Image (cartoon, rainbow, N blue to C red):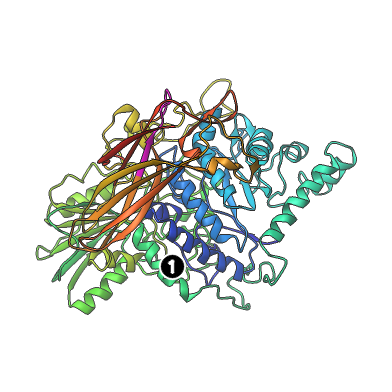
Amino acid sequence: MCLSDAGNGLRNTDFVSSWPSGLHVGASWNKSLAHQRGTGMGREFKKKGVNVLLGPVVGPMGRVVLSGRNWEGFSSDPYLAGALVYETVDAVQDVGVITSHYITNEQESNRMPANGMESLSSNIDDKTMHEFYLWPFQDSLRAGTGNIMCSYNRLNNSYGCANSKSLNGLLKTELGFEGFVVSDWSAQHAGVATALAGLDMTMPGGDDFWGSKLVDAVKNGSVPESRLDDMATRIVASWYKMGQDENFPTPGIGMASDLTKPRNVVDARNSTFRSTLFDGAVEGHVLVKNTRNTLPLSNPKMLSIFGYSAKNPDHNGPSLGSSAWVFGAQSFNYDEFSNGFFGSAAVGNTPIAFNGTLYSGGGSGATSQSLAVSPFEAIVHRAYEDGTALFWDFHNGNPAVNPASDACLVIGNAYATEGADRPAARDDYTDGLIKHVAAQCNNTIVVFHNAGIRLVDQFVDHPNVTALIFAHLPGEASGKALVSLLYGESNPSGKLPYTVARNESDYAVFGPDLPEAGIFRKFPQSNFFEGVFVDYRHFDAKNITPRYEFGFGLGYTTFSYGNLSIEKVADANTDEYPTGETREGGQVDLWDILVRVKTEVSNTGGRDGAEVAQLYVGIPDEGAPVRQLRGFDKVFVGAKGQKTVEFELMRRDLSVWDTVRQRWRLMKGGKYVLEVGGSSRDLPLKGTVEL
């Protein structure tokens, strides 16, 4: 079998597509697009002879704002992440899919043992585990994932790949997982213990813990022969389930070990999915400010462009003596990147990548571009067609600004990578550049390619900063997508899959937990005391006003909501606890539809556009969040048109985890509060239902 990175496209090979990152897909809020992306990626992996796609990522879940790998996942909300991972897994099944990293892998700092120090332990209670972190993995199992990857971190002071409670208990028993568990690269730290805990396959393999030693353990009775049979059965069953026994390419046929040497080329790209690459890039852009009708641009005579993230990196492709392209670090100082790669470093040295635009983040989840269009290249092409004058300066922090500019674009980024957590969620250099340009240009448009949350309060209220776009990590169609949005050929429809705060202190957990002096100095601990109150749940609980709330995003038209209807499904079983048998994903009646909610979405503007209708539920349980996302649908509505949106609430959506009965529980007799609108803080429709 051939296993390869990652959840955003094939890495370290040629003739493949660079897909929008998980965070970018999360910002699209588009289940159909997530499915199309999964299909396109899956076909590329298959054509290259890859049996197992090491993705998608639903851990980390965004608990730590500065976590280096948040960009690989979809969202800091488990419902949104779960819905999109379901679509992705379902689409990639032609290849085989691993849902990583299981579980509570929420930071890069101290993720691996080093210098006599053990990996960080994520210490979490049972209720938080089920209602937040396990939720999207449950969706991946319901979609039929063949594999789960156990992560580097310790879980309640037991290594993730040797934790019987999480692997045998939660995954294989409670959720009925029938596939195999594979370790992250070098995440196995014991032999017999991991075999008994539920690990089925190890990467990179070898005899350190298994191999001949596993044979000896079976012979001497330390590991039952039935456990070895179970390992093999799970692996082979997944292989057959994915249909890899018939007409599957030779494993690794398109994955050359050295791209600098002659070889038979396998071009995995398919022109059918060019529209998916483009649409995916477009829909993950989130417009959060647009004053004076700055956007879309209207026949500008002159544009001035500034910022290090506008142009392409200086090189793209494999280079002797450098692994920058392999790990998505072309835009970054690779020496700084590699020094912290194994996670012993607390943070990287700079929050930005000076050497060019970002198509993805860094590390094993990076994409390898066979072709990519930068924002500057796309703007030049459009300007040439329109006869627009262009001025640019990508080098100076205090550039000269031509006063004849109709608009000035400042294009920056916020870099993140595997192996190191981000040092900050803002940087003075870029914010200073923005303020310098805005002081001389009364129509300054700011664009961030951000691999995570980017704070903006140092400049966003400047009266000459008229527009702000979070462009995330769009993949190879980055420049084409941005120009299409800037000129109004596409209407922005992205929504934030996270909350943008005004201050760092507004978040429940901002930076990574680091080792403390005392008895645990060699055993770093991370206590998840905030429970399920991550991102908007925390802001709601503490009554903190964000800069831009979860689910927020502007477009070039406006929408209104009306005619809310709430209907309980006739004859649905609303007993307090589920009674169904356990299949992959848990008890089958967790997916029974109990309530249907309908609303009408009207386009009140003059342009066709898309709106993400969002349903939030307040569960009548003491200590529960004020509201939790429990439904969303992206609908395309013509100018002055109207569409009906229907949400289906399943038993799990309306349940809480009962730690005594160890089952999901409906709150009988209490009133569930249902709210519908365009963001977590713009919910004009409200109703209640009792079960």
Q: Is residue 271 visible?
A: yes
Which one is nearer the viewer's eye here, 425 or 299?
A: 299
Residue extent of the magenta highlight: 615-624
Residue at the spot of label 1: 315
Q: Residue 393, position in %: x, y?
A: 24, 63
Q: Where is the N terminus found, in terms of image quarters? A: bottom right
Task: Residue at 56%, 68% (x, y): give it.
Answer: 43
Image check: 220 left or right of 492? right
627 sits to left or right of 408: right
Between 275 and 325, the one lying in front of the other is 275
Image quarter hosting the C terminus: top left
Q: Position of residue 412 (x, y in %)?
A: 30, 55
Question: Which residue lies at the image location 66% right of the left edge and 43% below the top edge?
Answer: 176
Q: Of helix, strand and loop, which mostly describes the magenta segment?
A: loop
* SS for dot 1: loop
The structure residue drawn at horizontal position 33% and vertical position 46%, both measured from the top left corner, is: 551
Is-magenta flag for residue 471?
Answer: no
Please name the residue shown 51% across and 56% down the image. Answer: 88
Q: Residue furthest right?
A: 219
- Residue type (three-letter) at the residue carrying disc 1: His
Q: Quadrant of the rendered structure where residue 121 is?
A: top right
Residue 447: image location, x then y, percent = 27, 56
Instruction: Say few, some or many: other residues with alpha carbon within 10 Å of mark 1 (under 14 / 14 to 19 / 20 or more).
Output: few
> In the picture shown, does residue 16 fall above or below 464?
below
